[in-house]
Image (cartoon, helix red, strand yellow):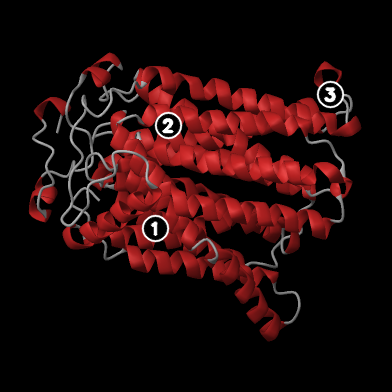
């Protein structure tokens, strides 16, 4: 279905949705889309600008929260490791709670105003400011909570920006290329993070002095790296803000009303927004329960996907004998492989359907995980042989989940539903860590203290449960 041949955007019945599977894709050609160069071309200006945001957003995810700044913040310079780690954990937990509570209603407000690009810009600015402000966090105990606060607030802005960013996918794609566009964005996100991380490692973090005479004294190398990470993200975020323009609610289509759904408040009212959100959930349960079942299944297996990267380095070092430098090298290789695989999988998404991509990815990951469990004593070579394919399937499953949801969200409610997508993921984010820990404890009881490799079984179990929940979901023949 091309945009020019689109029917009216009223919510069709289940039968109609299966005959016209483009529900959730914006189908009217308006001035905004025409000026953006159209959505049909894979490498159009809007697509490249949208994907550039994903390339830049890795500056916060990879450099701030994963590999560089949080490691710096929990070092002995800020106090005892137990205190710094507890402080960081508390800050991130508070941020996670805030995201879970506010993501759907803020996405709802972006839908109601018809200005997703504006809200993407506001939240991106928040990420930029918090990242740049990390420059002022000196390696002294008195700066610990400033660092924690900036990371936590930056996480809030990053997650809120991600909701709006994901919800913009239908505005830069068509039902025919949404899988490729989603895969391109997710794939370049992986690659962008690794490119920036490599630059910072070579230019500032490893050498002393580094580029421009930056030294390690007073944590200068880490603090300057944060300025460059902020600039990296800021520059990459700009194109989408100028290319994919907002037209306001009057120029777009009317948001679909769900059975039993309450009208959304004209002004931001937290209580009213939650009332409308609950009505939306009830309306979805009556009119499209499969969509809610997908949100539940995706929340479970996405937590398993996150667990693969969270615990991958731990298992590599503790079970397969990797050194610290070998873990970093593997991490770089895994992200590059995942990025390329995700871009390629986007082609299969459009040809074969997102559901097939997700199922194949989850089955392959379960197989690789069990292989790691079986060959836990074979050393680094076994981890390279099975760990890289395992990492390669993470991105395709994530990207295909985004494109699948995007195809089936009621028109005008992408921000709200993608907010629910984020919230459900946050709600079960304890599953993979808990399963990993429980499996290690079970292994210790059965085989003795050298049982870390049993944690792989816990991660596989989470993926398997998510897969079993997902298999009965039917969102249409384009799944």
Secondary structure at badge 2 equals helix
10 Å crowding of disc 1: few (<14), some (14-19), many (20+): many
Secondary structure at badge 3 equals loop
Secondary structure at badge 1 equals helix
176 relative position to 327: left or right? left
* Mark 3 touches mark 1? (CB < 8 Å): no
Q: CA distance from mark 3 to mark 1?
A: 43 Å
Residue at position x 40%, y 49% in the image: 270
Question: Which picture quadrant has residue 24?
Answer: top left
Question: Which picture quadrant has residue 131?
Answer: top right
Viewer can see residue 48: yes
User: Earlier along the polypeptide chain: callout 2 or callout 1?
Assistant: 2
Residue 249: percent from the left, percent from the top? Answer: 24, 29
Which residue carries the number 2 mark? 119
10 Å crowding of disc 2: few (<14), some (14-19), many (20+): many
Which residue carries the number 1 mark? 298
Count how many numbered circles sit on residues in the image: 3
The correct choice, above or below, for 169 with respect to 215 in the image is below
Q: Quadrant of the N terminus?
A: top left
The correct choice, above or below, for 306 with respect to 35 in the image is below
Residue 468: percent from the left, percent from the top? Answer: 36, 68
Residue at position x 9%, y 28% in the image: 5
Residue at position x 76%, y 26% in the image: 224
Q: CA distance from mark 3 to mark 2?
A: 37 Å
The correct choice, above or below, for 103 with respect to 377 in the image is above
Which residue carries the number 3 mark? 210
Viewer can see residue 348: no
| Along the line of sight, the residue nearer the viewer: 37 or 281 | 281
């Amino acid at each position: 279905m091309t945009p020019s041949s689109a029917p009216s955007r009223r919510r069709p019945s289940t039968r109609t949705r299966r005959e016209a599977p483009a529900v959730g894709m914006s189908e009217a050609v308006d001035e905004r889309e025409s000026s953006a160069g159209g959505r049909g071309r894979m490498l159009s200006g809007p697509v490249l600008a949208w994907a550039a945001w994903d390339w830049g957003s890795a500056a916060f995810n990879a450099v701030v929260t994963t590999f560089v700044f949080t490691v710096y913040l929990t070092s002995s310079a800020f106090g005892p490791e137990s205190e710094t780690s507890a402080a960081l954990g508390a800050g991130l937990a508070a941020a996670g709670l805030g995201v879970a509570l506010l993501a759907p209603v803020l996405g709802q407000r972006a839908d109601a105003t018809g200005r997703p690009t504006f809200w993407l810009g506001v939240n991106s600015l928040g990420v930029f400011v918090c990242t740049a402000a990390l420059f002022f966090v000196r390696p002294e105990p008195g700066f610990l909570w400033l660092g924690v606060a900036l990371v936590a607030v930056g996480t809030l802005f990053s997650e809120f920006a991600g909701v709006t960013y994901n919800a913009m996918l239908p505005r830069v794609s068509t039902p025919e290329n949404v899988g490729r566009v989603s895969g391109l964005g997710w794939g370049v996100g992986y690659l962008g993070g690794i490119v920036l991380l490599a630059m910072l490692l070579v230019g500032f973090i490893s050498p002393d002095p580094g580029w421009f005479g930056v030294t390690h004294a007073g944590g200068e190398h880490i603090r300057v790296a944060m300025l460059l990470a902020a600039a990296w993200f800021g520059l990459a975020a700009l194109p989408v803000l100028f290319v994919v323009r907002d037209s306001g609610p009057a120029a777009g289509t009317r948001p679909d009303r769900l059975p039993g759904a309450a009208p959304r408040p004209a002004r931001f009212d937290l209580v009213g927004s939650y009332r409308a959100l609950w009505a939306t959930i009830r309306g979805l349960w009556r009119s499209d329960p499969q969509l809610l079942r997908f949100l539940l299944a995706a929340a479970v297996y996405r937590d398993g996907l996150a667990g693969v990267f969270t615990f991958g380095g731990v298992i590599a070092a503790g079970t397969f004998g990797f050194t610290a430098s070998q873990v970093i090298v593997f991490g770089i290789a895994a992200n590059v492989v995942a990025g390329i695989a995700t871009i390629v999988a986007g082609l299969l998404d459009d040809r074969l359907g997102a559901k097939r991509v997700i199922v194949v990815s989850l089955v392959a990951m379960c197989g690789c995980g069990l292989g790691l469990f079986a060959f836990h004593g074979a050393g680094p070579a076994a981890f390279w042989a099975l760990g890289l394919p395992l990492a390669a399937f993470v991105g395709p499953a994530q990207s295909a989940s985004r494109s699948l949801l995007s195809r089936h969200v009621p028109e005008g409610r992408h921000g709200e539903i993608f907010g629910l997508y984020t919230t459900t993921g946050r709600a079960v984010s304890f599953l993979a860590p808990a399963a990993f820990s429980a499996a290690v404890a079970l292994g210790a009881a059965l085989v003795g203290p050298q049982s870390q490799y049993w944690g792989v079984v816990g991660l596989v179990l989470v993926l398997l449960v998510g897969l079993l929940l997902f298999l009965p979901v039917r969102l249409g023949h384009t799944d």
